Image: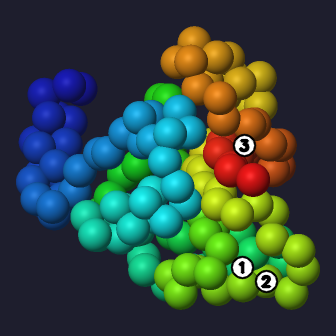
């Protein structure tokens, strides 16, 4: 059976775009930069769509990864990245009180407990927020 699958898998891999690549977001998610820097770096590398897909009332802007960018954070696949920087035209403002002067993070596929454990092992000061079953937000903020 493996001899039969090998040509199919090789053909499927050859059909993937060469620009497809994985990028780890672990380093910035130890909470050592601003929301502007985090999002601007990802935009500059064309890893996320520059237009937010959603803006929360607390002004957190959600951005989708580009189709050929496979983002990970501490071993978990990234579903979206989020960010906000007060008085920064890169971000849209929600209709409520902003969550912080500067905030950013990633929404990943993984349980709260597993994500929290991975952050602790990496020495990250990020906050873990439950979003939905097996969907967790990793969040950094500055007051």
Per the image, label 2 sits on a secondary structure element best described as loop
Query: Closest to the observer: 2 or 124?
Result: 124
- Upstream in the sequence, badge 3 or badge 1? 1
- Give the label, 2 or 3, closer to the camera: 2
Horizontal side of residue 5 vs 97, given as left or right: left
- In the rendered image, which quarter is residue 96 located in? bottom right
Q: Can you identify the residue that label 1 sits on?
A: 55
Q: Quadrant of the N terminus?
A: top left
Pinpoint residue 131: horizontal percent, then vertical percent: 81, 50
What is the CA distance from the residue labelled 3 to the residue labelled 1? 18 Å
Q: Is residue 72 above or below residue 90?
A: above
Q: Can you identify the residue that label 3 sits on?
A: 136
What is the CA distance from the residue labelled 2 to the residue labelled 3? 22 Å
- In the rendered image, which quarter is residue 95 located in? bottom right
| Residue displayed at 63% across by 68% down | 84
Q: Residues within 10 Å of mark 2 (few under 14, many from 20)?
A: some
Are discs 2 and 1 less than 8 Å apart at CB?
Answer: yes
Q: Can you identify the residue that label 2 sits on?
A: 94
Q: Is residue 20 above or below residue 40?
A: above
- Upstream in the sequence, badge 2 or badge 1? 1
Whether residue 37 is visible, yes or no, is yes
Are discs 3 and 1 less than 8 Å apart at CB?
Answer: no
């Amino acid at each position: 059976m493996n001899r039969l699958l090998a040509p199919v898998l090789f053909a499927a891999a050859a059909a993937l775009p060469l620009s497809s690549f994985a990028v780890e977001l672990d380093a910035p998610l130890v909470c050592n930069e601003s929301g502007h820097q985090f999002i601007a770096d990802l935009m500059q590398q064309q890893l996320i769509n520059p237009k937010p897909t959603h803006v929360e009332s607390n002004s957190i802007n959600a951005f989708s990864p580009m189709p050929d960018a496979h983002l990970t954070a501490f071993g978990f696949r990234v579903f979206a990245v989020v960010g906000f920087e007060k008085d920064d035209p890169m971000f849209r403002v929600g209709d409520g009180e902003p969550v912080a002067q500067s905030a950013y993070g990633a929404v990943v596929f993984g349980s709260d407990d597993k994500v929290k454990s991975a952050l602790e092992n990496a020495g990250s000061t990020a906050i873990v927020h439950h979003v939905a079953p097996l969907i967790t937000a990793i969040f950094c903020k500055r007051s």
